[in-house]
Every structure is written in C-alpha cells, then in structure tokens.
Amino acid sequence: MNDLAIAETPTKPTKTPRPYQVEAKRAIYAEFRIHRSTLLVLATGLGKTFVFTSIIADGLGKGKRILV
C-alpha cells in the first residue's frame, strides 16, 4: 500500500489573492521557466503558504504530479 496521500480532485482556493501575492506567483512562474527551483520571501503573515498552495492547485489542475 502506498503511504503517500494523492489528491484526486484539486480544490480552488476560497480566498482571493492580494495583488502582491498575484505578483509573487507570476514571478515564481517566470523563475521556473529559467531555473529548476526558486525561493519566495515575504514577511510574516503575508501569505507565503497561500501562494504555495495556489501554485500546487494550479499544477494539480493541469494533471501534474506534485512532490512537497
């Protein structure tokens, strides 16, 4: 039995991203076109986890496999 949890149906975030989170997400995707990894730096409480889970939801929605 596989111990990994697999999300069969991606869920959309229920919150609306703030403008700086949208820009952060765009910047991450731009970096992924050039580099294999990137780093998001935001102050405490500004939504790093929200941006991260939004990117994961995008990938799952496109049928990609996500390893965290």
Image (cartoon, grey):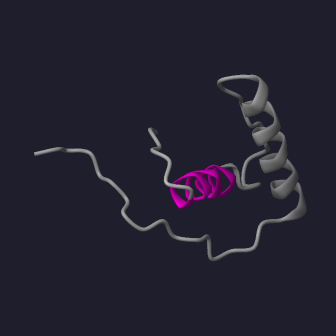
29 up-or-down from 56: above or below:
above
Q: Predominant secondary structure in magenta? A: helix
**Left-right relation of 23 to 58:** right
What is the span of residues highlighted in magenta in the rendered image? 49-61
Splitting the image into 4 quarters, where does residue 2 fall? top left
**Left-right relation of 3 to 68:** left
**Left-right relation of 6 to 38:** left
**Left-right relation of 2 to 27:** left
Name the outermost residue toward the bottom.
14
Q: Point out the image quarter for the N terminus.
A: top left
- Horizontal and vertical percent for residue 7? 37, 59
- Horizontal and vertical percent for residue 48? 69, 49
Q: Residue at x 83, y 57 (%)?
A: 22
Number of numbered discs present?
0
Is 9 one of the magenta-colored residues? no
Splitting the image into 4 quarters, where does residue 62 fall? bottom right
- Horizontal and vertical percent for residue 55? 64, 51
Is 60 one of the magenta-colored residues? yes
Q: Residue at x 59, y 71 (%)?
A: 12
- Horizontal and vertical percent for residue 54? 64, 58
Please name whichever residue, 9 or 39, is drawn nearer the observer in this view of the structure: 9
38 up-or-down from 58: above or below:
above
Please name whichever residue, 37 or 20, is drawn nearer the observer in this view of the structure: 37
